[in-house]
Amino acid sequence: MLKPVNLYSLVALGTQFVVVLEEIEGPRLIPIWIGASEGNSIAMFLNRIRLPRPMTHDLILSFMEKVQAKITKVVITELKESTFYASIYLEQNSHVQEIDARPSDSIALALRASAPMFVDESVFAQCEPLLKPISKDELNEFKRKLTDLKPEDIYKDIKNKPPENPPQA
C-alpha cells in the first residue's frame, strides 16, 4: 500500500543531507540520508535559486518537456540493508513507464515537476517509529535530535545485522 508523503524538512549534516518525508494522512516521518549534490539541488530549488545554466535535475525535466513526457509520481519502494530504493513513473503518449532511481534524485525531480510522492508501507514498517512534532518546542527538539541521528538509530535491519567482523575468541 502506498502512503502519500510531502517533504517535511531538509537538514544539512556536514557533507551529507537528511531529507525528511512526512506521511500526509498519518503521523509518521521518514528520514533519508542523501549526498551533498542531491541535497544542494533540493535546497536550491526550495530556496528558488536559479543558476544561469541548467543543473542536472533541471536538465532532465527540460529534456522530458521536449519529448512530451511527464513525471506522474515518485515512489520510495524499498529499504534493503539501509539503502532506499525508488521508482519514477513517466508518462509519454498515454504510456506509463517505471524507472528505477535513487530516492534523492526522485525527490529532487518530483519537487520540480510538482509530482506526488509516495512511500510504500513496507518501508515505514522497516523503520523505528518517528512521529511528527506537534508543538513548536517539539519541532525544535526534533530538529536538534535530527542533527545527532544516525541511520542505525532508525533502520531496524541495521540494528539486527550481526557485526561484519566479529571479535576473535
Image (cartoon, grey):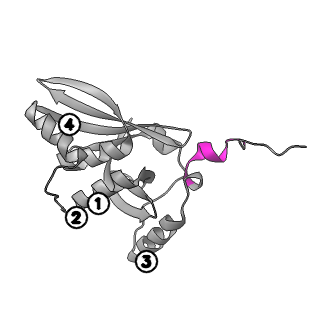
Question: CA gap, disc 2 to disc 1?
Answer: 6 Å
Q: Inspect the image, locate mark 2, and give the three-letter code of the amino acid beneath it.
A: Asn
Let me know if residue 158 is in the magenta part.
yes
If you read the primary sequence from the N terminus, does the residue marked by circle 1 or circle 4 appear first? 1
The residue that appears at 15% across and 52% down in the rendered structure is 53
- Secondary structure, mark 2, is loop
If you read the primary sequence from the N terminus, does the residue marked by circle 4 or circle 2 appear first? 2
Which label lies toward us, 4 or 2? Answer: 2
Identify residue for label 4: 71
Q: Are marks 1 and 4 in contact (CB under 8 Å)?
A: no
Which label lies toward us, 1 or 4? Answer: 1
Q: Quadrant of the N terminus?
A: top left
Q: Are marks 2 and 1 in contact (CB under 8 Å)?
A: yes
The residue that appears at 20% across and 36% down in the rendered structure is 71
- Secondary structure, mark 3, is helix
Establish if 78 lies above or below 29.
above
Question: Label 1 crowding class (10 Å Cα cut-off): few <14, some 14-19, many 20+?
Answer: some
The residue that appears at 8% across and 34% down in the rendered structure is 66
Q: Which residues are magenta?
A: 154-162
- Secondary structure, mark 1, is helix
Q: Position of residue 78 (x, y in %)?
A: 45, 36
Q: Name the quadrant containing residue 113.
A: top left
Which label lies toward us, 3 or 4? Answer: 4
Q: Position of residue 24 (x, y in %)?
A: 32, 52
- Secondary structure, mark 4, is strand
